[in-house]
Image (spheres, helix red, strand yellow):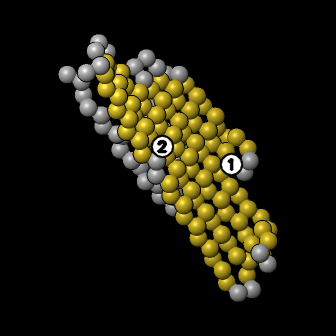
Amino acid sequence: MVGKVQLVMEAPLQVQTSMVKVEGVPTFENTQLSHQLQEATYVKDLSTVSMSTLSDRQEAEGSDVMHDEEAQRGIASTRSYYKYTDDNSCYLRTVNVEEGAIKVDMASRSCFAISDGGLRWPVRRLPRHLRLTRLPSPSLPHSN
């Protein structure tokens, strides 16, 4: 055997839309979107073993008030979390945007600078009504 490469990947997507419509009253609409990519790569050849992981998650939420099928006003926010690690490095980044303005943009080339806890490092906690599916990190075979 010359070598072995194994790639494990998961990419769930969740979209939830709700609408409150009452005759004679403007309609309220809310949409929440969550997407997560988790990828792990394990490489083994005759003399070395290496592993890398990538986790990337985006969450977005937007609400609007509609009257006669026209938006009267609305708000939106997005949150992005990114983490890459391999045998030699680690890179973390989080970006939060609210109503079109960047509120947080943090990046680090050290996993010790920001505690990730398995991608649970948003600067601000998500609203309780935004329920996201959190996936466990993929497990890869251990080298002997």
Q: Position of residue 45 (x, y in %)?
A: 31, 18
Residue depicted at x 71% and y 58%: 75
Q: Earlier in the sequence, mark 1 or mark 2?
A: 2
Among all residues in the image, which is located at the extreme top?
47
Q: Could one spot residue 114 in this view of the protein?
A: no
Among all residues in the image, which is located at the extreme bottom?
23
Instruction: Find disc 2 in the rendering and name its residue.
Output: 37
Mark 1 or 2: the one toward you: 2
Residue type at the position of mark 2: Leu
Q: Position of residue 50 (x, y in %)?
A: 35, 21
Q: Which mark is residue 98?
A: 1
Residue depicted at x 29% and y 12%: 47
Q: Nearer the viewer, residue 37 or 76?
A: 37
- Of the 4 image quadrants, the one containing the N terminus is top left
Q: Would residue 84 be found to the left or right of residue 141 on screen? A: right
Q: Dot 1 surroundings within 10 Å: few (below 14), some, or many (20 or more)?
A: some
Q: Which mark is residue 21?
A: none
Q: Position of residue 19 (x, y in %)?
A: 62, 73
Residue 4: name its quadrant.
Answer: top left
Q: CA distance from mark 1 to mark 2?
A: 23 Å
Residue 44: name its quadrant.
Answer: top left
When the figure is inspected, residue 119 is found, relative to residue 13, above or below; the finding is: above
